[in-house]
Image: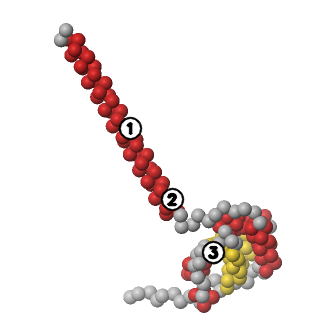
């Protein structure tokens, strides 16, 4: 018998995986907020919902690019740890224990705004598969080159031996 398919609430079902660089905050109960980053918001929220049935998406902020997204998450995590707000809850580590998340949102937005003024590297998502293929092709070419080099060295050694034999055979016939 098949297990019943999980029905997601509308606040998840209405989301889309649109590739934006997102910093998000979700919650299940008052005072505990799970934060994170993603470029596949719908997929990530479905996973979190399966894992711990959160009840609310508190904030979704478009960071503009992956570099800012990662940097903001790292800074927020470090700042939260410094203030001893980080806790492990729902078997998740990126959770802060605060009465309300609202006072922290302006700080996150200001960091994104400040970083947006700086030149950022382009997103390289989607290129990972191409990069792995490229690295594999390069390694294959290196391996082929090494094999050819060994075969060439073996042929050179055979030529050297043959030349010595010819030289010795020429001297012995005199």
Residue highlighted by disc 2: 131
Image spot of residue 153 (x, y percent): 35, 33
Query: What residue is rendered at 65% in x and 86% in y?
Result: 55
Give me the residue at 46% from left, 51% from top: 138
Quarter holding the C terminus? top left
Where, by quadrant of the figure, is residue 173 drawn? top left
Q: Check contact, mark 1 vs mark 2: CB within 8 A.
A: no
Given the current orientation, which residue lies at the most extreme left position? Answer: 173
| Residues packed near mark 2 inside 10 Å, few (<14), some (14 to 19) or many (20 plus) | few
Rounded to the nearest angstrom, the CA distance separating label 1 from label 3 is: 48 Å
Horizontal placement of 77 versus 156: left or right? right
Residue found farthest to the top: 174
Q: With 165 as the anchor, is 47 left or right in this view? A: right
Residue drawn 40% across the image and 43% down it: 145
Residue 21 visible at all? yes
Q: Quadrant of residue 88?
A: bottom right
In the rendering, at what x and y percent does residue 162 appear? 26, 24
Label 1, secondary structure: give it: helix
Residue 119, position as x, y percentages in the image = 72, 62
How many C-alpha atoms fall within 10 Å of the one at disc 3: few (<14), some, or many (≥20)? Answer: some
Q: Is residue 44 above or below residue 114?
A: below
Of callouts 1 and 3, which one flags the residue occurring earlier in the amino acid sequence? 3
Residue tagged 1 = 149
* Residues at marks 1 and 2, CA–CA distance in whole angstroms: 26 Å
Rate crowding at label 1 as few (under 14), some (14 to 19) or many (20 or more) other CA atoms within 10 Å: few
Q: Pinpoint residue 156: horizontal percent, then vertical percent.
A: 33, 30
For the N terminus, the image quarter is bottom left
| Residue at mark 3 | 20
- What is the secondary structure assignment of the residue under circle 3? loop
The residue located at (44%, 50%) in the rendering is 139
């Amino acid at each position: 018998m098949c297990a019943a398919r999980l029905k997601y609430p509308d606040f998840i079902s209405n989301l889309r995986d649109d590739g934006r660089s997102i910093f998000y905050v979700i919650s299940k109960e008052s005072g505990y907020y799970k934060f994170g980053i993603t470029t596949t918001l719908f997929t990530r929220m479905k996973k979190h919902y399966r894992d711990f049935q959160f009840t609310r998406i508190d904030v979704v902020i478009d960071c503009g690019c992956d570099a800012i997204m990662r940097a903001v998450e790292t800074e927020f995590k470090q700042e939260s740890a410094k203030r001893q707000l980080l806790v492990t809850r729902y078997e998740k580590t990126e959770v802060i224990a605060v009465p309300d998340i609202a006072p922290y949102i302006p700080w996150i937005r200001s960091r994104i705004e400040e970083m947006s003024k700086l030149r950022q590297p382009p997103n390289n998502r989607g290129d990972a598969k191409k990069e792995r293929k490229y690295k594999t092709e390069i390694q294959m070419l290196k391996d082929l080159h090494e094999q050819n080099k060994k075969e060439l060295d073996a042929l050179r050694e055979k030529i050297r031996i043959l030349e010595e034999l010819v030289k010795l055979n020429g001297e012995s016939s005199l």
